[in-house]
Amino acid sequence: MARLRTRDESELDEDTLAALAPVRASGAAIAPVYREYAASEPALRAYLGMEAAVRDGSLATREVEAIKLLVSGRLACAFCSTVHAAKGRRAGLDDAALEAIVAGRPVGEPRLDAMLHLVTTLLARPGPLTDDEVTAARAAGLDDANLVDLTLAAATIFFTNITNHVNDTRLPG
């Protein structure tokens, strides 16, 4: 059971409801997890803004989902791991790629492998990346925008993973 109160939509302020418009574009009600994150409406709005920036950024959807699956696995967020495996599949990641990402193995695509290597390194080792690591990522096709956008994707899912750990967010059923 969620530890954060699931707020009713009628309790949310207009700015928060406007920020949630892309989430509810399908006409569905706002998912409970968003209404739980609304315990801090400024934090929820910041998160939704980051998600919009990730969507509008330089990474393909399948790359974003691969990063989110990797981070969610490393942070042991079962809720997000399940969600991002499904989204990754819809974005074109096959079962072999999904399994490789979860296991921390290369997927066999130089650009995606370079992204996943950088994110893994940033999660595992404090401090800056080495010049060699950045040079290798550039050789795999990553440009400045890609480098910044992969950190934004990782930061966004980090927020949801750790907020889910505070909330004890679980899959329905």
Image (cartoon, grey):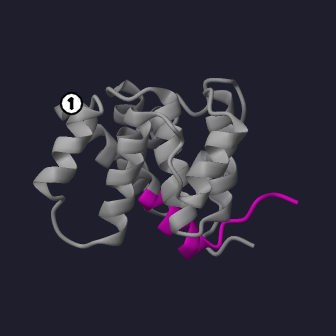
Residue at coordinates 64% horizontally, 45% vertically from top-left? 98
Q: Quadrant of residue 147?
A: top left
Taking 132 as reference, is 24 left or right? right
Residue 148, given in percent of the width and then of the height, sits at: 23, 41
Q: Quadrant of residue 78?
A: bottom right
- Number of numbered callouts drawn: 1
Other-residue count near label 1 (Cα within 10 Å), few / some / many at <14 / 14–19 / ≥20: some
Taking 170 as reference, is 144 left or right? left
Q: Nearer the viewer, residue 11 or 66?
A: 66
Taking 89 as reference, is 108 left or right? left
Residue type at mark 1 is Asp
Q: Quadrant of the N terminus?
A: bottom right
Residue 159, given in percent of the width and then of the height, sits at: 43, 60
What is the chief secondary structure element of the magenta stretch? helix
Residue at coordinates 23% horizontally, 43% vertically from top-left? 136
Check the image and report above or below for 80 versus 75.
above
Residue 104, given in percent of the width and then of the height, sits at: 53, 58
Q: Residue furthest right?
A: 173
Disc 1 marks which residue? 143
Q: Which residues are magenta?
A: 158-173
Q: Secondary structure at mark 1?
A: loop
Q: Is residue 125 visible?
A: yes
Residue at coordinates 72% horizontally, 65% vertically from top-left? 170
Residue at coordinates 60% horizontally, 56% vertically from top-left? 102
Can residue 3 be found in the magenta stretch?
no
Q: Nearer the viewer, residue 172 or 98?
A: 98
Q: Is residue 12 visible?
A: no
